[in-house]
Amino acid sequence: MSRSVLIPLAHGSEDIESVTLIDVLRRAQAEVTVASVEEQLQIRAARGTRITADALISECRETDWDLIALPGGMPGADRLHDCPALQGLLRRQHERQQLLAAVCAAPARVLGRLGLLDGRRATCYPGFEGDLPGGRAAPGPLVIDGHLTTSRGPGTVMAFALSLVGQLYGPAHAAEIAGQMLYPPALA
């Protein structure tokens, strides 16, 4: 069964987080739509990687998504937060209790600032805790609280993406995808 996933990107989105989310979810056979919140399809990620989106965010407003997953990075997270079309999608996703995920700065700078984490446990990249409800992050590299999943940053994004696969398709499928990618790697 195919699941619809929206991955919004902006100038300054974190390269590794963006590409890893896209890649892992597509490997799982999700129908991933990469949407630019900019005025053009191509974005320049935080480390200079150019990514061409599938659509503009304005073209995605009427779709019901099984998952919306936000990469972090700065100033990308702030640019995601400042997009009214994305704000509306995120609020609707939250109200419907559909899967909503964010990594790095995005849990704090997007979901936290929009009030979508109120009453929830969440984590984020160190230094951004001030934008989380209560001003502190829950311990751990990955925090799942109901339909909300948050993670800390580039080093945690593979586990984060695989967790999302598990939530969409079940743990067996997530384990299968992890195995195909040799994750976690044998370092011997």
Image: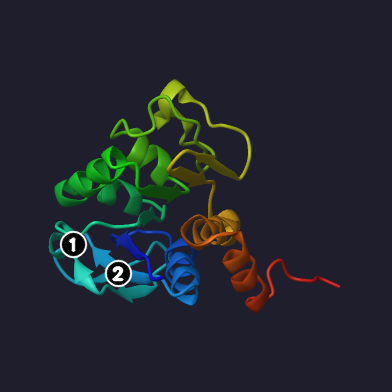
Question: Is disc 2 placed on a helix, strand or loop?
Answer: strand
**Mark 1 and mark 2 in contact (Cβ < 8 Å)?**
yes
Provide residue 68's location: percent of width, then percent of height. Answer: 34, 55
Distance Cα–Cα, label 2 vs label 1:
9 Å
Q: Which residue is mark 2?
A: 33
Q: Quadrant of residue 30?
A: bottom left
In the rendered image of this protein, does residue 136 appear above or below residue 96?
A: above
- Neighbour tally class for label 2: few under 14, some 14-19, many 20 plus, Cα within 10 Å: many
- Depth check: give the residue in front, 32 or 172: 172
**Image side of residue 178 versus residue 72, left or right:** right
- Neighbour tally class for label 1: few under 14, some 14-19, many 20 plus, Cα within 10 Å: some
The colour scheme used to paint the residues is: rainbow
Q: Is residue 75 visible?
A: no
- Depth check: give the residue in front, 179 or 183: 179
Indicate the quadrant containing the N terminus: top left, top right, bottom left or bottom right.
Answer: bottom left
Question: Is disc 1 placed on a helix, strand or loop?
Answer: helix
**What is the three-letter code of the residue carrying label 2?**
Thr
Provide residue 157's location: percent of width, then percent of height. Answer: 54, 58
Q: Residue at x 51, y 27 (%)?
A: 136
Q: Which residue is mark 1?
A: 60
In the rendered image of this protein, does residue 3 appear above or below residue 139?
A: below
Indicate the quadrant containing the C terminus: top left, top right, bottom left or bottom right.
Answer: bottom right
Give the residue at the far top of this rendering.
Answer: 134
Provide residue 145's location: percent of width, then percent of height. Answer: 49, 37
**Image side of residue 125 versus residue 44, left or right:** right
Provide residue 14's location: percent of width, then percent of height. Answer: 43, 60
**What is the three-letter code of the residue carrying label 1?**
Cys
Q: Is residue 14 visible?
A: yes
Task: Name the N-terminal-most of marks 2 and 1.
Answer: 2
